[in-house]
Image (cartoon, rainbow, N blue to C red):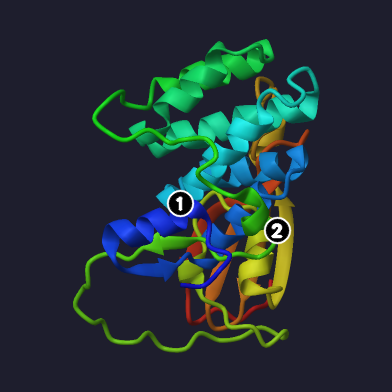
């Protein structure tokens, strides 16, 4: 067995006897969560929450990060937001394995907004009937140093015909829309697919809505991949400046031109 695997990966291997590597998104989230910096951890929590990612091996890394960060500097805005997003991500998993940890955080001396988010996340986590996550069971240092986080492989499924090779952009990187999920950030899509053939940005009618106080979806950007299709990003909030995937439209006839 290779060195560098997190302890949770090892436990998964022992439980199933078989393991496979995480997909690119999962490995990226795990590395970000293990970074130790509140800003990067917050971004990972947001991405996990917005994409609905639920792979337990990665969620265990998130749980370990939460256990180490929530009392580190609870009055600091960056740490408070990182803690809040980790609670939201774990709650969104619906996995009761994280109930006790999130409950502990919700009852701790954390920022009142953080407590609110953690209490809300706790409602989505069933209590009992599953082994609880134990703080210290994941070695974030090993993950941070490049250790691969493994996941239990699913039962074998009937073989499917190999999909036709997707067109590649100017960077030469293969464009595979199956890697992209709604809610992913624009930066993550850049990492997964490389730059598009072309792109365009435009305003939406929501900029004129008087009660759109968060300034959500007032602007969109489209990535055009020649011979593959296009991806539409929505500005999550004008105050944050983060674009997230709204639509994924495969279209082999896409010209790549606006």
Whether residue 241 is visible here, answered yes or no, is no
The residue pinned by badge 2 equals 187
Frontmost residue, 2 versus 43: 2
Q: Which residue lies furthest to the left in this view?
A: 158
Residue at 52% in and 35% down: 135
Q: Where is residue 143 in the image (x, y as percent from the top left)?
A: 62, 57
Relative to 214, 184 lies left or right? left
Task: Indicate the quadrant where residue 212 lies.
Answer: top right
Instruction: State whether residue 26 is above or below residue 218.
Output: below
Task: Indicate the quadrant where residue 123 lies.
Answer: top left
Frontmost residue, 157 versus 247: 157
Mark 1 neighbour density, 10 Å: few (under 14) some (14–19) many (20 or more): many
Q: Where is residue 82 in the image (x, y as percent from the top left)?
A: 68, 33
Q: Position of residue 114 (x, y in %)?
A: 63, 19
- Under circle 2, the secondary element is helix
Instruction: State whether residue 154 is above or below residue 141.
Output: below
Residue at 19% in and 78% down: 158
The residue pinned by badge 1 equals 8
Residue at 45% in and 31% down: 91
Q: What is the CA distance from the residue labelled 2 to the residue labelled 1?
A: 28 Å
Q: Which callout, 2 or 1, points to the residue nearer the camera?
A: 1
Q: Which mark is residue 163?
A: none
Relative to 242, 99 lies left or right? left
The C terminus, quarter of image: bottom right
Instruction: State whether residue 57 is above or below residue 4.
Output: above
Whether residue 160 is visible here, answered yes or no, is yes
Instruction: State whether residue 128 is above or below residue 244.
Output: above
Q: Which of marks 2 and 1 is nearer the N terminus?
A: 1
The count of marks equals 2
- Under circle 1, the secondary element is helix
């Amino acid at each position: 067995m290779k060195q560098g695997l997190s302890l949770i990966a090892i436990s998964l291997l022992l439980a199933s006897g078989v393991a496979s590597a995480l997909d690119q998104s999962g490995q990226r989230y795990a590395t970000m969560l293990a970074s130790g910096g509140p800003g990067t951890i917050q971004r990972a929590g947001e991405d996990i929450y917005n994409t609905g990612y639920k792979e337990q091996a990665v969620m265990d890394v998130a749980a370990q990060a939460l256990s180490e960060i929530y009392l580190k500097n609870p009055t600091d805005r960056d740490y408070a937001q990182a803690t809040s997003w980790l609670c939201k991500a774990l709650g969104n998993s619906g996995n009761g394995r994280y109930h006790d940890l999130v409950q502990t955080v919700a009852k701790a001396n954390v920022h009142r907004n953080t407590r609110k988010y953690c209490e809300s996340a706790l409602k989505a986590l069933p209590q009992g009937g599953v082994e609880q996550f134990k703080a210290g069971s994941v070695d974030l240092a090993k993950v941070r140093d490049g250790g691969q986080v493994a996941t239990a492989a699913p039962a074998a499924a009937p073989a499917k015909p190999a999909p036709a090779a997707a067109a590649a952009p100017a960077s030469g990187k293969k464009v595979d829309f199956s890697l992209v999920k709604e809610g992913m950030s624009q930066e993550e899509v850049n990492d997964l697919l490389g730059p598009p053939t072309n792109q365009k940005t435009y305003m939406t009618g929501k900029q004129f809505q008087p009660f759109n106080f968060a300034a959500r979806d007032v602007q969109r950007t489209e990535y055009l991949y020649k011979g593959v299709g296009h991806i539409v990003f929505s500005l999550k909030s004008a105050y944050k400046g983060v674009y997230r995937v709204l639509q994924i439209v495969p279209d082999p006839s896409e010209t790549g031109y606006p």
